[in-house]
Image (cartoon, helix red, strand yellow):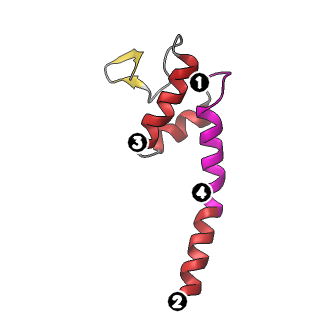
Amino acid sequence: MKKAVTYLILVLLVLLGPFSFVYYRYVTNIESPYDDIGIRLNSSVPGFVQDWGCGKLKENFAEQLPPLGCAVEGDPTTWR
């Protein structure tokens, strides 16, 4: 049973690792907040991770319109 749990954890790390790296690279970039893959990942992560990611994007791109998922609901021109 211990081996099965160990293998399951290893498989989860292998599968989630690349997505985590791509998401981190998206929210810390300084080129553009409008990367399609990054926006999709940001829309699918839990709320507290999305809040962190939107905060990091806002630090670098506060003068631009927020990407989908980082705008105030009902006002697509304001960062949340």
Range shown magenta: 14-32
Residue on which disc 1 sits:
33
Please say if 5 is above or below 66: below
- Pointer 3 and pointer 2: residues touching (CB < 8 Å)? no
Q: CA distance from mark 1 to mark 2?
A: 44 Å
Q: Is 23 part of what is drawn in magenta?
A: yes
Q: Within 10 Å of the Cα at label 1, are there few (<14), some (14-19), or many (20+) other Cα atoms? A: many
Please say if 8 is above or below 58: below
Helix, strand or loop at label 4? It is: helix
Q: Earlier in the sequence, mark 3 or mark 2?
A: 2
Helix, strand or loop at label 3? It is: helix
Residue at the image position 47 percent from the left and 27 percent from the top: 68
Q: Earlier in the sequence, mark 1 or mark 4?
A: 4
Q: Within 10 Å of the Cα at label 2, are there few (<14), some (14-19), or many (20+) other Cα atoms? A: few
Quadrant assignment, res 7: bottom right
Which disc, if any, is residue 16?
4
